[in-house]
Image (cartoon, grey):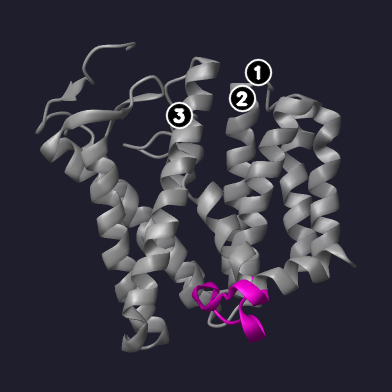
Amino acid sequence: MSGGRPTQGKPGRNWKDLRARLLSAAVLVPVAALCVWAGGAPYAALIVLATAGMAIEWGRMFGLRTASWRGVLYLLWPVAAMAAALGGQWRGAFMVMGGAFVFGPSLWAGQVVIGCAGLALLWLRMMTVPGAGVVLFVVTCVAVSDSGAYLVGRLLGGPKLAPAISPAKTWSGSLGGLACAMVAGGGVCSLVSGPGNWARGMAFGALMAVAAQIGDLAESALKRARGVKDSGAIIPGHGGLLDRFDGLLVAAPLAALLSLGAAGGAAFWYVTQAGLMSACWGHAGT
């Protein structure tokens, strides 16, 4: 809408997808948690499958047929990037990802966005300490932010956050998701790094929530531009993999970038300004 007062959301409505969401979470959460905890092959398989699935959905939104030779190649591209990273060739993984420009700007953008998220999640699990705890922090904050925004927004309603992009999202939901992520971040950080890190966990939980909501809005804008409601239908109550994991597309790379500024491969919430600047300058000079 243009001009006038902001549209008011009606509280207490739109619960029809709650049951499907809960059932999906009952399956996804234990599987993901076990893979994160186990690390190694199970975690690698989870990331490879997720990135490949999201690549399929991105390609479909831009009219790429999965059954075509070009569609198959597009599907295998992120798999090759993840395989390079799993072999310790991180620069090679980014080179593979960058080479996807042959598909054209729109499809290349998908490879970069999805590839960076997949590589970030591998990096956080394999190259930081404690890897499982760091990934758990990011995934928990993103998931709790999403769920908190969903519940609070539907309970309270109120002014729309970005009606031109996603008419269902409200300011109350956004702030509710932020608050929930802060509490979750404080709890996970205390569990992983000790109770003295509660405030640090809350601060970085808020940062992950903001990143997740940016990813959510960006994916909503993309779907609106492409004229689709959902990126897919693989997850009941959510739609596609991109619909479910859009927040991680921004939050995970941000966490991985911050981890470069934490001494000794420590968790990214120990990042320092000096450490981050040194890491960035050091990588730029090599």
Residue extent of the magenta highlight: 260-275
CA–CA distance in space, label 3 to label 1: 18 Å
Front residue of 141/161: it is 161
Element type at marker 2?
helix
Which residue is disc 2 drawn over? 60
The amino acid sitting under disc 1 is: Gly
Is 262 inside the magenta-drawn segment?
Answer: yes
The amino acid sitting under disc 2 is: Arg
The quadrant where residue 104 appears: top right
Label for residue 63? 1
Residue 210 is left or right of residue 273, and the answer is: left
Q: Is residue 282 above or below residue 212?
A: below
Element type at marker 1?
loop
Front residue of 257/49: it is 257
Judged by depth in the image, the label closer to the viewer, 2 or 3, is 3
Residue 265 is left or right of residue 11, and the answer is: right
Tell me where residue 251 appears, x and y as whole percent.
51, 54
Query: Looking at the image, which residue is at 39% across and 75% down?
Result: 200
Which residue is disc 3 drawn over? 220
Q: Are marks 1 and 2 in contact (CB under 8 Å)?
A: yes
